[in-house]
Image (cartoon, rainbow, N blue to C red):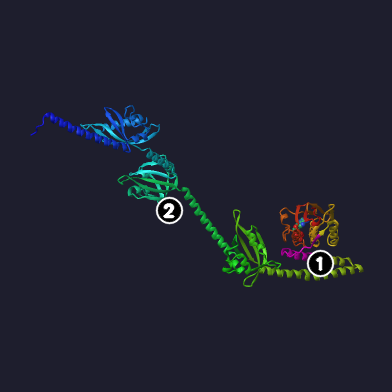
Amino acid sequence: MNTDSPLQQARRRIADLEHTLSQARDEIARLEGEVTVCPWLTIYWSVTGATVSAISRGNLHYLAQFGYADDAFQSGQKQWTDIIAAADLPQVATDTMRHVQERDEQFTRVYRIHTGTGNVRWVEEHTAAVKDSHGNITGYLACVLDITKRRLEEEQRFTILESLPVGVWTIDRQGHVTHGNPAAHAIWNAPEFSDELIGYKGWWADTGKPLAMSDWASYRAVTTGATILNEEVEIETFDGQRKFILNSAIPLRDEVHHIVGAIVVNQDITNRKRIEHEREKLLTEVNRRAAELDATIAAMADGVVIYDNHLTILRMNAGAERILGFTSELAARPLAERLKAVHFRTTEGTPVSLPKFPVVRAVAGETVRNVIYSLTRQDGRELWVSLSAAPIRITDAVIGAVGTFTDITEFHALQQRQTELLHIVSHDLRLPLSVIQGYAQLLAGIITARQLDGELSAGLSAIVRSVQRMNLMIQDLVDVARLEGKQLMLQCEPVAFDHFLPELLQRVAEILPISRVQVHLAPELPPVWADYARLERVLLNLLSNALKYSAPDTPVEVRAIRQDDEVVITVADQGCGIAAEDLPHIFERFYRVKGERKAEAVGLGLYITKMLTEAHGGRIWARSTVGKGSTFFVALPVARGDLLP
Ligand code: ADP
């Protein structure tokens, strides 16, 4: 039986309550202690009627981090809403009211606050509803996190994404484009991306086949979850251009690993493709040319050898192998060793020194043409070769040389026979002529002495003239052969015109009407450096032409003047002249003006005259006017001793 008085009972009840209260106080103190060390700030949004006020509590360190004193919000002077950025405050307030009305248990939001030190920080709020005993929401307890760092990183990431040189866009599960960076817009030339993947046009770059919707990397990433990297696709942009892109797609997943969309990465490779295409074209062209060159070199009868700049043989054709008699083993050796196996000698018979060898000169940048060598091969055979060599350059650098070897053994033998023939012509043929000439002159003497009739003497002088002309013609033929074979040796000496010309005229008085010739020599004319006999031929040819191609009653003028280091001799007539179309050809071999029928002419005279002049280091040219006459010019070098210093 309970004997306690109501008072006692009341006292015990009070004691119990006090105990419970002190326990509750301890619990609150413990919780507050915990809150103080929590890495967030706790605030309480109290909802009174239609207004919202925030009371902040919590972590002191956290407050310090925001630049506020521990009790900054406790005295009631400063409210949390005071430090919310003005731009975000209305939103925060209406937001809270909406959540209350909609009886939301919890929500999350992000806004900016001003710190006590005047900075702005981003905070994220996670709230939970606080209710009274009737279940009405009286406020929200919010935990506030400083997310400034995360936010900055996100912004940075966004900036990077925006400025990436590759196109990046995101799509959702349905294939709607949710974002595209500027590069993506530039690639597709799209002010706005259209919503449907299906509208995009593309072809596989390798096959040219069109892409069906299910072929697109983005479609496959979203539907299968596969990551697709670098597929080459040709696309048609929104304004109808064709471009090549590298197309990649990576699926995006939520926390529970469901596919929510995809990131699509496009790289514009149109330029690279174009360059690749051009390179391929170029390569085909290069290969084609190389094949052409190969075929040409292989088909050439001449030997062609291509060297690098150390004169290692890179390639040689069959012609070269045949002429040089090289085994492939010998061809692979260095030049010095190759030249020990085959011996090149000059036309004078002296061995060729390495620095003078044409291909050695070619890699030094020189072009050498038609040097004649005798060649003794490894197998002992003797050949005559004509060797040319030229440098191979890329831009300015010599990267090698090409040498061509022509087998001229047969030609050389032919030349040898020609020399022998020349000997026969010049000596053996002239001998009977001089006998004829001698006897004719003897007979002429007898006829004159015996005063026999004029017809005989005219006949004899015709024989003498013809023999002399024939002698000249033989001389012409012999000279041409020698000049062309480069066998003519000049014996030069100083020749003075004041002696030379009168002597010449006197000597030809019998065969040419020299009374028509007028000589004008400039005063103090220096002697020229010439072969006396050949110079006579030059002048004689010009004189006889001038006399031959002009009327018998017209003069032929011979002049000589000095011009710099040359003496220029002119032979001018007042004859028929030479037509403009013939003038450039008159110095050619056997060239004769059309319609001309002079028995004694063979068309070699001017050709020989030119060759002889040039053999002297001189020049010859002509001017002519039809009906008025012609002037021939011969410029010869002044004899060296008489050159001015
Ligand atoms: P040819 O032995 O026939 O005279 P040339 O070589 O001396 O041969 O001359 C070539 C041609 O040039 C001649 O056929 C002639 O038509 C023309 N020719 C040369 N000299 C003269 C000249 N002084 N006047 C007119 N024609 C000339």
Q: Nearer the viewer, residue 571 or 74?
A: 74
Residue 339 x, y percent position in the rendering: 63, 67
* Residue 477 is a magenta residue: yes
* Residue of label 1: 467
Q: Amino acid at mark 2?
A: Asp
Residue 272 x, y percent position in the rendering: 47, 49
- The reply, left or right, for residue 162 in relation to residue 96 is right
Residue 281 x, y percent position in the rendering: 50, 54
* Residue of label 2: 206
* Residue 19 in sight from this viewpoint: yes
- Provide the major secondary structure of the magenta segment: helix
Residue 24 sits above or below residue 343 on the image? above
Considering the image in quadrants, where does the N terminus appear? top left
How crowded is the residue under tag 1: few (<14 C-alpha within 10 Å), some, or many (20+)? some
- The reply, left or right, for residue 145 in relation to residue 361 is left
Q: Amino acid at mark 1?
A: Val
Q: Which residues are magenta?
A: 465-493
Q: Nearer the viewer, residue 521 or 531?
A: 531
Observer-side mark, 1 or 2, equals 2
Identify the element where label 2 is drawn: loop
Which quadrant of the figure shows ligand 1?
Answer: bottom right
Q: Residue furthest bottom?
A: 380
Q: Residue furthest right?
A: 450
How crowded is the residue under tag 2: few (<14 C-alpha within 10 Å), some, or many (20+)? few
Residue 405's quadrant in the figure? bottom right
* Residue 194 in sight from this viewpoint: no
